[in-house]
Image: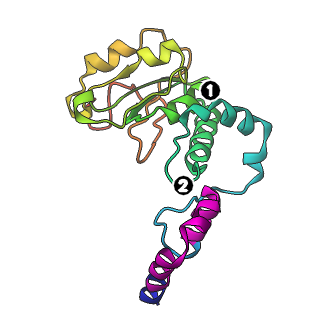
């Protein structure tokens, strides 16, 4: 069955006139790719009342700087939705500080800072990556100063200590990495469970 769908998708790509393709919106093209199973990562945006709330709409409007246009693809909402839900969870749990490994464009940090969590993080050095690009004006000056460009495996306790130049108002917390976004409430940000930074 998968082979038949792949054949139909290939046939449609070849047979649809360019003039018709040009008239379709990026969102319509993405929906067709998802229906025909051409798109490996369709927009998995959740249709939920939480994402129609005034709080989400306000933060989402402020986060437009993180939207990246790609050819024939709509701006995906699921990343913003995930960031919003995570920020709400951390705020509800009383997380005061978060340190993100692999902050990329800083979207998670933006949402966490918007709910009052002090954020810091590290990502690969400039020479090792081209995708770390913080949009202008997306983060306040204090948060930008706490963002490092040091490989996580070279990160030391002194590096992490140096970013927290303000005293903690709430218990120290720690976000280990982007993939799991695991918040460890009440854990010193200098230490993980095994004692490494």
Residue 57 versus residue 91: which sits nearer the camera?
A: 57
Would you call the spot at circle 1 few (<14 residues within 10 Å), some (14-19), or many (20 or more)?
A: some
Q: Is residue 195 visible?
A: no
Measured as percent of width and height from the top left, residue 197 is found at 28, 29
Res. 181 image quadrant: top left
In the depicted structure, whether residue 106 falls above or below residue 49? above
Residue 31 versus residue 182: which sits nearer the camera?
A: 31
Q: Give the main secondary structure of the magenta stretch.
A: helix
Q: Residue at x 62, y 43 (%)?
A: 85
Left or right position of 29 against 13? right
Q: Residue at x 41, y 87 (%)?
A: 3
Q: Which residue is mark 2?
A: 73
Residue 108 versus residue 18: which sits nearer the camera?
A: 18
Q: Residue furthest top?
A: 166
Which secondary structure lies at badge 2? loop
Measured as percent of width and height from the top left, residue 27 is found at 63, 58
CA separation, marks 2 and 1? 28 Å
Residue 23 on the magenta span: yes
- Looking at the rendering, the stretch of residues picked out in magenta corresponds to 7-34
Measured as percent of width and height from the top left, residue 96 is found at 54, 24
In the depicted structure, whether residue 38 falls above or below residue 55? below
Q: Which residue is mark 1?
A: 114
Measured as percent of width and height from the top left, residue 68 is found at 52, 41
Q: Is residue 52 visible?
A: yes
């Amino acid at each position: 069955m998968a082979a038949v769908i792949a054949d139909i998708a290939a046939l449609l790509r070849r047979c649809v006139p360019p003039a018709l393709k040009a008239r379709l919106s990026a969102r319509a093209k993405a929906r067709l790719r998802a229906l025909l199973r051409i798109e490996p990562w369709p927009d998995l945006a959740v249709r939920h009342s939480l994402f129609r709330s005034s709080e989400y709409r306000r933060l989402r409007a402020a986060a437009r700087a993180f939207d990246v246009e790609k050819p024939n693809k709509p701006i995906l909402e699921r990343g913003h939705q995930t960031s919003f839900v995570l920020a709400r969870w951390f705020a509800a749990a009383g997380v005061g500080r978060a340190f993100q490994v692999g902050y990329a464009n800083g979207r998670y940090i933006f949402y966490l800072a918007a709910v009052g969590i002090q954020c810091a993080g590290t990502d690969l050095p400039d020479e090792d990556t081209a995708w770390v690009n913080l949009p202008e004006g997306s983060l306040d000056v204090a948060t930008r100063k706490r963002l490092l460009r040091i490989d996580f495996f070279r990160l030391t306790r002194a590096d992490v200590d140096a970013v927290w130049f303000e005293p903690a108002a709430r218990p120290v917390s720690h976000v280990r990495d982007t993939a799991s976004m695991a918040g460890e409430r009440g854990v010193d940000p200098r230490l993980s469970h095994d004692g490494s930074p």
